[in-house]
Amino acid sequence: MDPSSNIDWDSLGFDYYPTRSLYRMDTNTSGEWQDGGLVPFGDISISPAAGVLNYGQGAFEGMKAFRSAKDRITLFRPDMNANRMLQSAKRLVMPKVPTSKFIEAVTMTVKDNADFVPPYGKGSLYIRPLLWGTGPVLGVRPAPSYTFAVFVTPVGPYFKGGVKPLKLKMTRNFHRAAPHGTGNAKAIGNYAASLYPLKLAKETGFDEVLYLHAAQDDLLEEVGSANVFVLKGGILKTPKLGGSILPGVTRDSVIHIAREILHLDVRETDVSIDDLITADEAFCTGTAVVVTPIGEVTVEDDAYSIAGQGEGEVTGKLRGLLTAIQKEERDDSFGWITALD
């Protein structure tokens, strides 16, 4: 029996589910990529001296494939993810995966696991490209060889129970990233560092942690797994990219939609705590969370409700427009959709 036939599409959460195959490509010890291809999905063996295990030399991406309203499988802005992995590789001193090879690997993996793409309207196929130092290394230096892999898994919503306003904990006790560090790379270490603050937040009833700028702790940075936007008086603001904020694909997409379809005044700028707690609407953006409203934020011990506390009108429009483009429910005037034959 095909393993995808056992999936209850109506009960999908944002969890790992094994599929048929993954893509793998390795370098030689000179750092040159060798031919890659699909291999059966399964565990990967690795040296205990691998660069990724000892010094965290690794990066990843998050993407989605959809079964669209036109009854075909689509990718959303894969070139953006390919480019971001190029930048992450440069920052972490790993060999760059050419954009054409990145997109080819993603396409091959999705096509071979096409039956794991949820039916239209039931979810998406999450795509996880990975790049890491495979070769053994003892001193603090780049690994001698590397692996690039892509695996996929069917997913439902990131937050169970549908779209609901997030309850965020703002913290001054932890920072996600430092200026001039690796915050603008999708480095694996950035996420390991966020696990403990997230654990503490969830234990006290919060959904996520909202991090502040490490050098100016009256300014917002981002949520652990998403970028942040605030709307006040018709002006939509989001923290500017300055080296410590991840340049989110959904962030960039929302900026374009807000400017070019909704004709909003969008500003990439400093965003203060006061901007957030006095906002008309606020929301998070990310591949996993899409566009999710912020309903309440706690600063120190003071809880503030964002006006309306639910999904605001603009937040709802942005989410609706973005997902309609992704699912081909409306014309893609931006050229963001790549349809797989």
Image (cartoon, grey):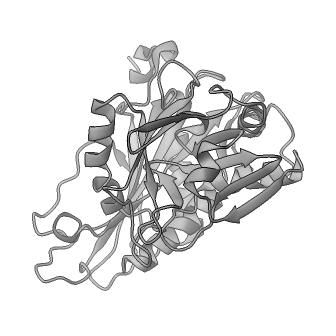
Could you say where residue 295 lies in the image, as x and y percent from the top left? 57, 31
Drawn side of residue 289 relative to residue 225, left or right: right
Drawn side of residue 7 relative to residue 174, left or right: right
Q: Residue at x 13, y 83 (%)?
A: 139
Evaluate whether residue 114 shows in this view: no
- Residue 215, by quadrant, is bottom left
Q: Residue at x 89, y 50 (%)?
A: 263
Could you say where residue 211 lies in the image, as x and y percent from the top left? 44, 54
> Looking at the picture, does residue 129 appear above or below residue 16?
below
- What is the total number of numbered labels drawn onto the structure image? 0
Evaluate whether residue 174 shows in this view: yes
Drawn side of residue 276 relative to residue 201, left or right: right
> Looking at the picture, does residue 217 appear above or below residue 106?
below
Q: Residue at x 70, y 33 (%)?
A: 72
Q: Residue at x 32, y 42 (%)?
A: 198
Could you say where residue 96 lies in the image, as x and y percent from the top left? 46, 75
Picture quarter with the N terminus: top left
Could you say where residue 336 lies in the image, as x and y percent from the top left? 75, 52
